[in-house]
Amino acid sequence: MGRQREFDVEQALDAALCVFWRKGYEGASYTDLTQATGVERPALYSAFGNKEALFRRALERYYEHYLDFFPAALELPTAREVVERILRASVELNTRYADRTGCLGIHGALAGSDDAAPIQHALIEARADGEKSLRERLERARDDGDLPQTVNCAVLAALVLAVLHGMAVQAKAGFSREVLDSVVEQFLSTWPSA
């Protein structure tokens, strides 16, 4: 009979998520992860598998616990409300924690070696899924008359995500919440109306 775990898996996963959020996938060493979780390497491997598997679990948790505003925003009545909620919630998240600003997904996808290619691909796929969901919501808005018929919803979704991702990079670079809120205001002032 195997030994029982002597640590809380959920707490360890939260601690690992914070390390990845702060340092990115490649910047996070196993020493960083064991120190943050308080779990020795063999037990960490036993619970989560290798570093890639641990990152994927942390990423799932990030989407479930921190980016849950995105799918909720898609249910709002107008396209402008959808986009405003996504942008404002992102600003809040990207600046909420002084020790881990920006976005885990964007930070992890920006740079990486060939060894990290599977992680980069997973992050790119997750971003593409978000863009697809937003595009489909914008298309519904256009079909319902909430957006002009001339709007290219694929381009508009890409633009929204360009602003969203750019703000995540700016937050990581130290831009304040106030500045990023002003970016949101400026962007929304150009929103296409029906």
Image: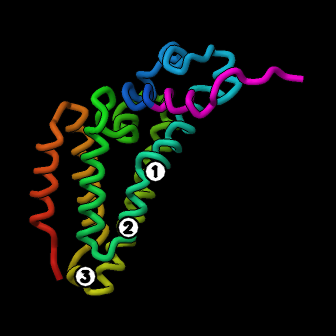
Q: Is residue 52 visible?
A: no
Instruction: Judge the density around disc 3: few (<14), some (14-19), many (≥20) Cα neighbours within 10 Å.
Output: some
Percent x, y for residue 163? 22, 52
- Residue 13 among those drawn in magenta: yes
Which tag, 1 or 2, sits closer to the chain's start? 2
Distance (Cα) linking label 1 and label 2:
16 Å
**Residue at which label 2 appears:** 74
The secondary structure type at the circle numbered 2 is loop
Disc marking residue 126: 1
Amino acid at circle 3: Asp
Closest to the camera, between mark 3 and mark 1, is: 3
**Residue at which label 3 appears:** 146
Which tag, 3 or 2, sits closer to the chain's start? 2
Residue range highlighted in magenta: 1-17
Q: Is residue 15 visible?
A: yes
Q: Image height check: is 67 above or below 27?
A: below
